[in-house]
């Protein structure tokens, strides 16, 4: 039997061993920022990228929770909670939160995705301590009052209505449902009118407590910052809210999960009185950890990633059948999507779909030319670098990398991986992805005879 004094000694010894662990992940050279990571004893990870040449800083907190973590009755809870964390804490009202950042000319926002949520503020480097305090206060001290839940319900229902009024946006939600069905990945991030109306303050509070533990969070900051100062400020903010345990706790690992169910040859049509028909033709893609994703990125760029891409040239430049036509990829923890979007006059929808399907089939069977591949590699390298020219983009890169991959890759390494893609790599992934039977989602004013012909595109 252990005495109480022995227990106290053991506990003190354990707490003494629980120290923050700091490491340098990327050593900055040639103007590239230095990336450092500290893991606090309570399991909170803090990653920063230091760029002394800029005068701004972006601070964000990433939560390991998205709409994929919701049950059918909780659909929309993650996004609802995102709204509610701006509504007030023990220390600040909703007005205090917004006015604090507005007063220094900063910007603050958040976004919810299928597998994560992010809250961030971008400010002058001298105002970073304010941003740290405000965002950490929101994440650790939200009140989630019933009156705020009821008020914000109206705003979210309006957001759903706004999305429904934009068929070019809504068709991507429809495509996710076409591919995944009644699976969490197939449900809309915003939820539906019925599920949002059914959510209560108690259910949202329980969801908050379950998913916003420090072990589920990654703090990310980029800009003209000092890593050690950010760590001290974040630690102080979390300890002030008593949200950080004193003992060593292991952070949650990057998401694994079961492979989502996927279907082929499905067609879903929503009839709507619009001037255009909005279509997405696509098939299963790759998980975000799949090593073939670099080759798929080159393939996607060559097929529909710019004005010189095959789809843009064939559909818009040569025939003028659509104003907007492009391809895209979405990678999740265990699966992915590849899709082709086009918006066109309803009378042209079958011509557009035939051209897109013909191009996909041709590339699946014969691949791309070396010239197309080289051009796509150059375009992808350039857009990768240009997309990281502000502190917000850098914060997104390091925060998402830590949460989703558990590691960081330097920009030079990313460029090298893109440059290493060979024509054989692209031909192989084209056969694997584009050789599958596609599914189709359409929103528009198609007549019965037109609608009945949609299955030709996926036959």
Image (cartoon, helix red, strand yellow):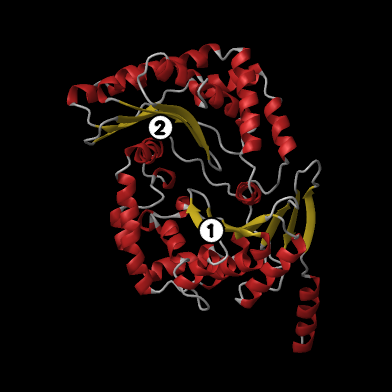
Mark carried by residue 310: none
Question: Whole-percent x and y of residue 23?
Answer: 79, 55
Q: Earlier in the sequence, mark 1 or mark 2?
A: 1
**Viewer-side residue, 404 vs 158:** 158
**Viewer-side residue, 56 vs 394:** 56
Mark carried by residue 107: 1
Q: Residue at x 67, y 60 (%)?
A: 125
Q: Residue at x 33, y 68 (%)?
A: 151
Residue 407 seen: yes
Instruction: State how many labels appear.
Output: 2
Label 1 to label 2: alpha-carbon separation = 41 Å
Q: Is residue 422 above or below residue 382?
A: above
Residue 454 sits in which quadrant? top left
Q: Secondary structure at mark 1?
A: strand
Residue at numbered disc 2: 263
Question: Whole-percent x and y of residue 424?
Answer: 64, 17
Question: Whole-percent x and y of residue 226?
Answer: 75, 60
Of marks 1 and 2, the one in the foreground: 1
């Amino acid at each position: 039997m252990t005495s109480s004094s022995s227990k106290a000694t053991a506990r003190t010894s354990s707490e003494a061993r629980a120290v923050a662990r700091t490491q340098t992940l990327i050593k900055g050279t040639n103007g590239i920022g230095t990336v450092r990571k500290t893991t606090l004893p309570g399991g909170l990870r803090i990653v920063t990228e230091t760029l002394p040449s800029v005068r701004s800083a972006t601070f964000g907190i990433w939560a390991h929770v998205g709409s994929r973590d919701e049950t059918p009755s909780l659909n929309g809870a993650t996004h609802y909670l995102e709204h509610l964390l701006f509504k007030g804490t023990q220390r600040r009202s909703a007005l205090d939160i917004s006015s604090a950042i507005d007063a220094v000319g900063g910007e603050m926002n958040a976004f919810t995705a299928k597998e994560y949520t992010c809250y961030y503020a971008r400010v002058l480097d001298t105002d970073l301590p304010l941003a740290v305090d405000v965002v950490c206060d929101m994440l650790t001290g939200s009140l989630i009052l019933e009156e705020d839940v009821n008020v914000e319900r109206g705003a979210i229902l309006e957001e759903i209505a706004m999305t429904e009024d934009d068929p070019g946006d809504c068709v991507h939600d429809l495509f996710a449902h076409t591919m995944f069905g009644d699976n969490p990945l197939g449900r809309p991030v915003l939820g539906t009118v019925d599920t949002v109306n059914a959510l209560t303050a108690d259910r949202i509070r329980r969801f908050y407590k379950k998913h916003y533990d420090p072990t589920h969070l990654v703090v990310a900051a980029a800009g003209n910052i000092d890593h050690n100062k950010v760590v001290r400020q974040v630690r102080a903010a979390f300890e002030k809210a008593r949200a950080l345990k004193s003992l060593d706790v292991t952070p949650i690992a990057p998401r694994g999960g079961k492979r989502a169910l996927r279907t082929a040859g499905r067609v879903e049509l929503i009839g709507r009185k619009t001037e255009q028909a909005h279509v997405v033709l696509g098939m299963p893609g790759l998980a975000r950890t799949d090593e073939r994703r670099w080759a798929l990125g080159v393939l996607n760029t060559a097929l529909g990633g710019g004005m010189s891409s095959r789809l843009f040239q064939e559909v818009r430049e040569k025939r003028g059948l659509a104003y907007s036509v492009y391809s895209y990829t979405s990678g999740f923890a265990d699966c992915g999507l590849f899709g082709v979007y086009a918006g066109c006059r309803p009378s042209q929808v079958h011509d557009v779909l035939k051209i897109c399907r013909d191009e996909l089939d041709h590339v699946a069977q014969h691949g791309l030319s070396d010239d197309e591949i080289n051009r796509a590699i150059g375009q992808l390298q350039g857009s990768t670098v240009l997309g990281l020219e502000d502190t917000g983009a850098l914060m997104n890169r390091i925060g998402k990398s830590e949460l989703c991959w558990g590691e960081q890759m330097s920009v030079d390494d990313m460029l090298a991986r893109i440059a290493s893609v060979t024509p054989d790599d692209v031909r192989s992934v084209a056969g694997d992805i584009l050789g599958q039977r596609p599914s189709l989602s359409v929103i528009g004013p198609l007549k019965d005879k037109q609608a009945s012909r949609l299955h030709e595109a996926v036959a």
